[in-house]
Each structure stands twice: as C-alpha cells, then as structure tokens.
Amino acid sequence: MLAMASLIGCNSKPNLKPSFYLGADLSYVNELEDCGGIYREKGEKVEPFGYFAKKGSNLIRLRLWHSPEFNTYSSLADVEKSLKKAKNSNQSVLLNFHYSDNWADPSKQIMPRAWQKIKNLNILGDSVYIYTLSTLTYLNGRGLTPEIVQIGNETNIAIIQHPDSATNGSINWKRNAFLFNRGLQAIADFNKNNHQKVETMLHVAQPENAEWWFKDANANAVKNYDWIGLSYYPKWSKYDLSKLESTLKNLKKSYGKKLMVVETGYPYSTLEYDKANNMLGKDAAIKNYPISPDGQLSFMLDLIKTCKNAGAEGVVYWEPAWISTACKTQWGTGSHWENAAFFDASNSNEALPVFKFFKPIF
C-alpha cells in the first residue's frame, strides 16, 4: 500500500485550481427540490450543493439547453441558480453546452429549434459563436463565470445536426470542425475581452470511441481546446478499467490535453423504487464490484486510481443527487437513477458510503 494521503479536498477558494477534480453533475437538483425532494445525513436534511462541498467535491457540472422542450429546467435561468449555489460553496463549475433543446447524446445531436431554419453554414456558425459568447458574457456580469466550458455533450456522431439530416453513420468533418471551432473561438474571444481563463473541453462517450474521434478531430484542425472529456459507464463500454487506463495514456501522449472522466455511474441496488425504470439494473454489474453500497464505493475508488495512474486530472459522477420524487421525466414518474445515486432510496435518502469517493485515502 502507498503511504496514506488524501488526494483532494474542498477548495478554500473557488478559483484555486486543484491538482485533481472530484465532482458531481447536479443538473437535476433544482427540479427535484421543487418537487419536494429531501436529502439527509443521519436523518437530518442537508442542502445538496453545500453538502457535496462539505464531503470534498470541488467541481460541479451543469448542463445547459438552449430552449428546453420538456420544462424550464436546464435553461440559462436554472443554470444561473445552480451556479450561484456552486460558487457559494466554493466549488468550480464545468458548464456543459448541449447546443440542443433536449438531451444531446451519442445517438442524437438535434440542433435547437431556433436554428433549424438556418440553411447557411456560416450563419449557423455565427449563431453558435454569438450564443456561446453572450451566455458567458451574461454569467460573467453576475460573477458566475464557469471555470471550464464543454462544447457539446457526447458528440460521437457530430454536433448540432438538423433533425431532418441523414448521417448514414459518417461524420461530415468539414462541417463538424467548423462548428466546434466557432464555439471554441467564442470562448477564446470571451477570455481575451474579459481577462478570463475559462478552459475548454470536448466530450465523447465511452473510451473505445475516443482514440478515433480525437484523431479525426485533430486531422480536421480541431486543436485549440484544453480538455478531453469522456463518459465511462461500464454497462455500455467494451473496456474494463485496465483498458480505460491504457486509452487515457494514449490520448495524453497523442494530444497533450488534460483528461477528465466527466460522466460515470454504478448502482448500489437493483431495486426499482418508483415507476420510472432504472437505467442501471442487474445487467450493470461488473466483475469484482457487487451491486451494493460497498461495491459502488469500491468501483469509484478504483476508477480514481485508474485515472490518476493514467495522468488524468478529474472524475465526475453523473447525477448522484437524482433521487426519486413526484417529478415526471419524459419517460416516467420518479427517477431513472435513484438506485445509482449517492442517497439511499430505501432509507429516506440517507447519504451512502460512496461519498467517501470525494476524499479517497490510498
């Protein structure tokens, strides 16, 4: 065993960059609290953003939709509310531009309705640039500038596609690179105009897609970004932790970018606690990590070790506060993730052992 040492704790200053980010995507919290959701430690109610900071989180990830289709959450006003909570608890923020009105993911990247009548690529690029720049300018004026900005979410199949477009599985990299670079240029210009140092990230899902995707991006002159962000869900990945580590090392060597796993998750239970079906069921189990509170923590600690060994600089858990409430999703009532959250659905949403993830001792 290595000498015992804590990798990271909570920052005393929000702008002091840690050597390693350990964070949480808390995009759902405002909605869940509005629906009566309560989080507890030893039976006492806790405020999520402050509680995550107390436990050692130093980064909050937040998704931003252009004009949300389903309800008003993940809008700019909602993100502003969450940013205030994150900053007030001395946590950095990774702002995730989906460039969509709904979920952007490896299977769909539907452009906002406001842009769907645009036929000219240059005008679409201007829309990306202006939207990105104006959003950051607005937040900066309120003292809420994020530390990192993500240009697109899980953009495996490209970014900002028209809903009527047919891709036949191939990426039009001339178009793709142009739109990425317009978003990146907006942040570069924002930094220059406002004397800021907001960092940038590109993000794809699952490590097995990362090497070919970033190779193609690089070949098409998408180079001026700071971070490679990956989703790593064992259920949907062909790679175990060992293969993840080798992939991260290869990416680091090839592109010299900082690396972060910005989405991951592992269940503590196989039970369904509401009428919203769980995304991670029994089929999410992997060898050596039982689906249990201890198994969930063990997986997360080993994921941190893997990322550290590979030279990565952060791990973010996706929606650890997505507890079951009376809220409706687009597919059911409740949560599709309560059995993979950090709060025990069988015990009044009591904090689980996995919170030790934020202060690992090795």
Image (tube, rainbow, N blue to C red):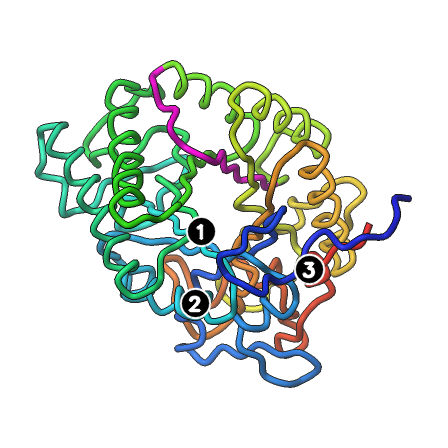
Mark 2 neighbour density, 10 Å: few (under 14) some (14–19) many (20 or more): some
Left or right: residue 162 versus residue 50 is left
- Marks 3 and 2, Cα distance to the nearest angstrom? 19 Å
Question: Which numbered disc, 1 or 2, marks the residue that appears first in the sequence?
Answer: 1
Q: Amino acid at mark 2?
A: Thr
Mark yes or no: residue 48 visible: yes
Residue with the most extreme front position: 195
Q: Which residue is mark 2?
A: 333
Q: Main secondary structure of the magenta part?
A: loop
**Pointer 3 with pointer 1, Cβ within 8 A:** no
Residue 84 appears left or right of 318: left
Can you say whether 7 is above or below 308 in the image?
Answer: below
List x then y, in percent, for residue 109. Answer: 31, 38
Residue 303: x and y, percent? 69, 43
Instruction: Tell me the quarter of the picture where residue 32 sits.
Output: bottom left
> Front-most of 333 and 30?
30
Residue 277 in view = no
Q: Quick one: SS at disc 3?
A: loop
Residue at x-position 17% and y-position 44%: 130
Residue 82, labelled with which disc? none
Q: Mark 2: which secondary structure?
A: loop
| Left or right: 86, with 166 as reference point | right
Residue 72: percent from the left, percent from the top?
A: 27, 65
Foreground of the two, 233 or 359: 359
Residue denoted by label 1 = 94
Determine which residue is flagged by label 3.
Answer: 269
Bounds of the magenta segment:
220-233
What residue type is disc 3 on? Ser
Q: Earlier in the sequence, mark 3 or mark 2?
A: 3
Q: Secondary structure at mark 1?
A: strand
Q: Residue at x 77, y 47 (%)?
A: 289
